[in-house]
Amino acid sequence: MPEQSKTEVEKELQDLRREIVEARNLVIKSDNLLKNLHAEVKAVGKRHEDFQKRQWLSSAVAYVLFAIIAVGAALMITSARSSSASNERERLEKMVADLTTQLEKQRADTAAHQTAQRAAAEVYKMMTNLPGDERLKGIDALVKLDTSRLSNLERQALNDRASVLRRETGDAAFERGKIAFRKNEMQSVISEMERFLAMNPPQEQALDASFFLGTAYNQTRQHDKAVPMLARFVEGDKSSKTRDYAMLLLAQSYQEVGQYDKALETARDAAGTYVNSQYQPQFRGRIATVKRLMNPDAAAAPAAVPAAAPAQAASPAGQ
């Protein structure tokens, strides 16, 4: 027995070392991506400066052309016949108004573009330089940012950085939630898994998180919240090794919220599907309890067998 315990400890240490190495590799990869994005943003800024110089040059040319047109219009007015002077004046005044409007619009667009660029740079800095989860403030600011004034490359850089940040923060929350699940700290599981699901994770990880979160809600007697999480996991991952346990908890939560038909259906489905499951006594006990609740006038049935504790159930990932 001591040798076997030692072997298990060494195996767990090897797993921990492997997870640490993988986490380090992920951090290095993320850092390289950040450096590449930073270089791209600097390149975009350089191109914008060149574009701004050309824009100022075009504005100067527009002013020169406007002056030439005004002088020519004055000469035309003085040399024109008196009968057409009024119409010519109106035409030129309209032209001047149009040119002035175009210039003002160009100035407003330039100012708006510069303002949007400064705001985008500030948002990118928040998502990059702030410590820890405070970087999520950058994602909130990105949602409020008007990106219609930005170039496609600038928008792509911001969205890519936000995606990387969501993935990093979500993965960290997911790992903390799994650790809390192993320690039976269900309030921490709820906090971390709710944060993880808010990051729009991939389908497979979302199903695993639904199992952890549904189990935590069930154990903390928040059965109205446990039902949708456990039902999502049961319907979405029918090959999981912990699906029988999830169905047991789902039947219990259905019972606690008064949905006896669904509780009975779930318990019967689990008992028929997982004939060799270690939870067969609990399935039968749950079926008997629900039947007694649905027909209170019938003879009293045996007391229901309680659901297995979370420490006895493996996680969907087999960890």
Image: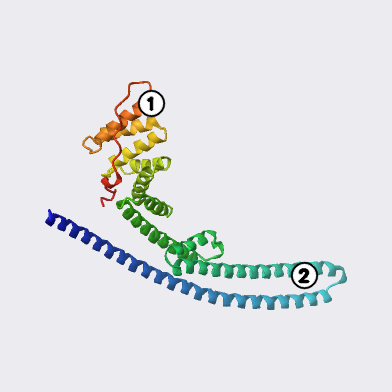
Q: From mark 1 to mark 2, how far is it between C-alphas?
A: 89 Å
Res 89 → quadrant: bottom right
Judge by depth and name the residue closer to the eye, 2 or 125: 2
| Callout 1–callout 2 Cβ contact below 8 Å | no
From the viewer's perspective, is 90 left or right of 215? Answer: right
Q: Secondary structure at mark 2?
A: helix
Q: Position of residue 299 (x, y in %)?
A: 33, 21
Please determine whether, in this image, residue 191 is positioned above or below residue 139.
above
Q: Residue at x 24, y 35 (%)?
A: 280
Judge by depth and name the residue closer to the eye, 2 or 252: 2
Q: Position of residue 61 (x, y in %)?
A: 65, 77
Q: Position of residue 138 (x, y in %)?
A: 49, 63
From the viewer's perspective, is 114 left or right of 135? Answer: right
Classed neighbour count for the residue bearing mark 2: other residues with Cα under 10 Å, few (<14), some (14–19), many (≥20): some
Amino acid residing under circle 2: Leu
From the viewer's perspective, is 74 left or right of 199? Answer: right
Where is mark 1, residue-wise?
Answer: 294
Where is mark 2, residue-wise?
Answer: 92
Res 112 → quadrant: bottom right
Judge by depth and name the residue closer to the eye, 32 or 275: 275
Q: Residue at x 76, y 66 (%)?
A: 94
From the viewer's perspective, is 78 left or right of 282? Answer: right
Amino acid residing under circle 1: Met
Q: Residue at x 36, y 49 (%)?
A: 186
Give me the disc on residue 249.
none
Q: How is the image coloured?
A: rainbow
Q: Secondary structure at mark 1?
A: helix
Q: Position of residue 223 (x, y in %)?
A: 40, 40
